Image: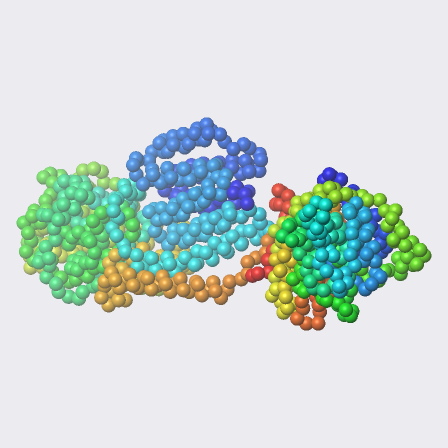
Amino acid sequence: MTTAAPQLIQATLAQLNKVIHGKEPQVQLALTCLLANGHLLLEDLPGMGKTTLAHALAQVCGLEYKRVQFTSDLLPADLLGASVFEQQAGRFHFHPGPVFSQVFLADELNRATPKAQSALLEAMEERQVSVDGVTHPLPAPFFVIATQNPQSQSGTFPLPESQLDRFLMRLSLGYPEPAAERALLKGRNGRVLLANMQPTLNGNRLKALQSIVPQVRMTDTLLDYVQRLIAYTRRSDVCHLGLSPRGALALVKAAQAWALLQTRGHVLPEDVQAVFIAVAGHRLIGRQEAQGDQLARHILSKVDVVGSGNGNA
Amino acid sequence: MTKHITYTGMIWLLAAQVVVILPFLFDLPIWLLPVLLFAAGWRLRVLSGAALQPGNITKTLLVGLGVGGLLLSGLKFPSLDAMATLLLLGFAFKSLEVVQRRDAIVVIFIGYFLVALHFLYSQSLGAALYGMVSMVILTGALVGVQQAISEFSAGQNVRFNLRLAVFMLLQCLPLMIVIFVFAPRFAPLWSLPLATTQAKTGIADRMAPGDIEKLAKSGDLAFRVAFKGKRPAQHDLYWQGLVLNHFNGHEWRQFARDYDVYQLKTALLSHYRWNPKSVQVQGTAVPYEAIYESSGQPWLFTLAPTVEVEGAVLRGADYRVMAQQELQAPFLLKAVSYPDAQRDSVLPEYLRTLALGLPPTGDARSRTLAQQLWRETGNPQAYIDKVLARFSEQAFAYTLNPPTLGERDTIDAFLFDSQRGFCAHYAGSFVFLMRAAGIPARVVVGYQGGEWNDAGQYLAVHQYDAHAWAEVWLAGRGWVRIDPTTAVAPSRTEQGLEAAVQAEGTFLADAVFSPRKIAWLNGISQQLDTVQYGWRRWVVGYDRAEQAALLKNMLGTFSIERVALLVAGLFAAIGLFWLLVLGLTQRPPKEALEHRLYRRFCEALAKHGVQRDVGVAPSTFAAHAAQQLPALAGVIREFTQVYEGICYAPTADGQNATRRLKALLAKVK
């Protein structure tokens, strides 16, 4: 299995790139997020291919896929499921909601009320659902891909920091490259290709890959760099809110998964840098104008990659 | 971290061991050095992979050989020399076993001990300076054996370690001074059979014709004297060592029986002890302090008669001052003499007997001459003048190379046949003639004159100043010093031996390169001697009495509490000072070697015009730099690869990788 891991990953990436044109970095990051067993937040304008990406990921991984369009009148029970009284049996029977799936696409998460949002977010963190005092474990792997529109759009309930923190990564797809867009216009529609897509993974294979991620080697020198980055977010005056320990953990886990994706057995600073914006962007709150991804990029440029200090001298 | 010593560390250790062992080779078997070189050489070959670590049997055999050599080397057991040699042998062999760092540390600590041990053999300024150099090198080795890998070249490594060692030792210096000045100085709790091989030098306790001129051929220092008041005239500087009372027809000795030091001590404490009432103090006082070189003999040399003396010394009825035991180390004496004082206005019967004794037979011609002269003159003063006049009027000659006189009738042979002699001949025959005429007389041996060092304001007395003269007891005047040599060679007491034998050209004839023969060298040697004197006087001579005087001076009244308070205060001040220095100069901890090398790599590339921004990861930068500098692309890629390997995917062979980094860095520059 371990020896086959690189080929598996390459095949998976190839499949994904066939469906989503010209977005290799985002596709890689999305797969990284999956390998790191974290949830993904896609933030972009409508019609940029968020749903296609989520769908493709589920398909290529051979995972069961469910999608819920979040609206302002969505209730928690619509997501989690409800206990219904069965007259023949004479007892309540739990009917699982759409969240009981391997890949759950929460479309336009920020359109739902905080009540519905938090119901999902609890499921994400605990990987289980409690209804009427009974705990129901969610399937494994369980992977939430949430999409949201930019906050400036009307009719949205922005996610609080504590809940944003639960997403391992936040990605934006952005407008396609002209060539990719041309291909799209010529009719090579992703959604059509999606149907013909061959799954390269299945639940067990994915779990096996996920179990390799923590084995990717991180030396003290690398952790020094990670700690310097974290220390910078906490100490410098550009950030209002630094990275939490959960954020730091997310960073190294994502870096390990990224290194695995590059078929490397150890983590390089490049790996940390590659995932840093996606991992830290939605967790940082800047003091000045620079926010989110821009702020993360600024931090990367300021912290020395080389050296042995951990930034706490 | 590996606990094994590296090749460089081993070379450091070997160098330190050689430095420590070298000064012992003057006093101890010289084959210790080859043993050390052999052992260390073997170990170095093991380290370079050319030989195997010796097994237990080999080691046992080697130790057996070494101990055998020790037994065959003729050292007395038990003695300091034998014990020191045994320790040095172990020290030399230990280098064969030095595998781990702790072994090296054992060797280095023994090295420190050996540096201290060498002071039992020599306490000269040179030995002290050499000891300091040894300490620096030992400490450098201590640094060296701790280093796993070095970014330095060999030269830089030596400089770095030595600089660190010097800095560390400089920090100890204030503590050392405080301890030296204030630590209580106890008498040793036990005594070792010390320095058994040390030769006895200087004046001996007997005098046969020819003895003193042998001594006079040596340019070694005997002692130095600093006068507190006015310096007496050169011709009055008669440094009395010991008095020879007994003549056996050939040799002058102290007493009829031969006394060893302990018997002599007993005599000086009983029947031959000094009687303070026997001297009538008059004239000016001459206070002075003298530092005697270690001679292996107990004699001290003072201006007779010495009235006051500081320190634990013995004093005799003949006004001598003598140390309690043989001098194995420089000895400081403070004394006040009154050269004009009258000694023994009443001569005790015991001393009179001693001062008149002659062998029953022998030297018949001299006895006849004495009777004849006494008949001619009739009173002691006239008789003395007559005898001295005979020396100056007849063809007597003063020479460093007198003819040998045989075993018997030596006085006759000198007075009537050869008439060529050194001070011993004149003093001996003069006293013989006095005694033959019934005048109490005795031979005094010691030194006469000395060389004034104007820069150091002291008088240096050398072995060639050794001299013998006479004392005659005259009623109403007590003991009177008479130097018959002046009758023959007046310049001897005025200008010293060099002038007295100038015509003969025999002064220090054997010492071809003596600095005294070359004027400008003589100046330098005087300067050097001044420094040596200061060292002897103020450092080696700093004893319990000096310490007590200093403490009294500093503290007013002397009490343990005050001393303790002062020492504690000084320690606290030193500690505070270093704390302050550390606080002011502390720098952030240094980065690991590979990072420093990488930064140098970046600096080198910056000189080529490719700058790395801090946030750029190594391989990203390498790709960019390789594109900008195609000529260096290979080196840049390899360097980055090795560097990333060390940092992010280290293997067991980190040392080689670091070495490779250094080599690659050199190519970028």
Q: Is residue B577 left or right of residue A66?
A: left
Image coordinates for residue A263, horizontal then vertical, percent: 74, 46
Q: Horizontal placement of A212 versus B233: left or right?
A: right
The one of B476 and A199 positioned closer to us in this rendering:
A199
Q: How is the image coloured?
A: rainbow
Up-down relation of residue A89 to residue B570 (above or below) = above
Determine the residue positioned at 12% across, 56% down: B479
Q: Does any portion of residue A88 appear in the rendered image?
A: yes
Q: Residue at x 71, y 57 (%)?
A: A77
| Picture quadrant where residue B609 is located | bottom right
Q: Which residue shows up at 90% across the image and 57% down it?
A: A184
From the viewer's perspective, is residue A3 above or below residue B588? above
x, y percentage for residue A92?
68, 49
**Residue name at image x 57 percent, y 34 percent:** B50
Q: Quadrant of the C terminus of chain B?
A: bottom right
Direction bottom: furthest residue: A288
Of residues B319 and B374, the one nearer the viewer is B319
Q: How many marks?
A: 0
